[in-house]
Image (tube, rainbow, N blue to C red):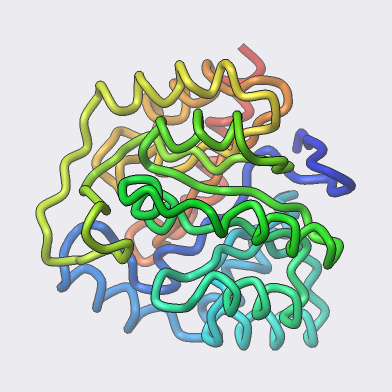
Amino acid sequence: MDFIKIGNLKISRLILGSNPFSGFSHQGPNRDMEMMRYYTCNRIKEVLREAEKIGINTIIGRADHHIMRVLMEYWDEGGNLQWIAQTCPELTIEKGIYNAIIGGAKGCFIHGGVMDFLFANNRLEEIPLAIEKIKKAGLIAGVAAHNPEVLLWAEKNLDVDFYMCSYYNPSLRDKDPEHKSNVTERFRKEDRDRMVEVIKILKKPAIHYKIMAAGRNNPEEAISFAAKHMRPQDAVCIGVFIKDKPYILQENLSLLQKYLAS
C-alpha cells in the first residue's frame, strides 16, 4: 500500500468510504434501505477489519452518533483505522466538529453539500473560523465540494490541510444542503472532467471521491481514470457494498495499485 502525508498524518492512498454504512446509496430510497438493513454494526466492523488487513489505514465517515458508536466498538476491540470525520448537514457545523473532536477523529472536513449550499447563498463567512477550530483541536482540517467553484474559492480564502473533491455534482444544493434520495441525480462526464482540471491547481492534497458515480461507472475505467489524475500527494476514497461483491475491497486495491504503477 502506498501512503501520502496530510499534516502529520500518514494516510493510505486508498481510503475506505462509508456512505453505504449510513444508507446513502445515491440510487434511490429502496437501495438506501437495503444498505441500512444489511450494514449492521457487526458487518460494518467486519469491513473495517478487512480494510485494515489489506493495508488501508483510514476511514472517512460522518460525525454522527451511529458512526461514532461503531468506531468506538471497533477501536475497543483492537481496531486501528484512523477516522477523518465529515460534518453532517442535519447538524450545525459546530456540532459536527465537536463530535469529531470528542469521538477521536484525526481530521475533520466540512460536508460538501453544506459548502455548496453556503457558496450558492453567499454565506461562507463562518467557514474560516470552523477551519481554525478544527486545527486548534489538533486535527487536520479540510472542506469538501461537489461544485468545483467552491474549491477555487477555498483555495483563495482558506488555510486548509486538504480538499475533498467529488468527481460529480449530481444535484443542486442551492436550496438545501442535505442529500434527498428521491431526487433524480445526474452523473455527467463533464463534471468529472472539470473537477480533475481544478484539482491540478490546488496547492494542498486532494482526496478524490464519488469516482464510481455511486456504482454507475465500470470499476476498472473509474479507478484507471482516478489513478491517471491523482497527483503524488493525492488519495482516493471509495465506499463498498459487500453484499453485492464480497471481495470488492481487494479488487479496488488491486486496480488502484495496477494503474498507479502504470
In the rendered image, the quadrant that contains the N terminus is top right
Considering only vertical position in the picture, is 39 above or below 182?
Answer: below
Work out whether residue 12 or residue 46 is closer to the camera in this orientation and state it: 12
Q: Nearer the viewer, residue 43 or 92?
A: 92
Residue 160 falls in which quadrant of the image?
Answer: top right
Question: Can the viewer see residue 253?
Answer: no
Q: Residue at x 80, y 68 (%)?
A: 80
User: Which residue is pictured at 75% across the width and 75% down the height?
Assistant: 101
Residue at the image position 42 percent from the left and 63 percent from the top: 19
Q: Percent from the top left, x then y, of residue 26? A: 25, 57
Q: Is residue 58 toward the left or the right of residue 167 in the image?
A: right
Indicate left or right for 22 with 163 as reference. left
Q: Residue 145 placed where, x, y %?
A: 44, 44
Identity of the residue drawn at 25% across and 21% down:
190
The image shows residue 222 at horizontal and vertical percentages of 39, 29
Residue furthest right in the image: 8
Viewport quadrant of the C terminus: top right
- Establish if 202 lies above or below 254: above
Counting the numbered discs, the total is: 0
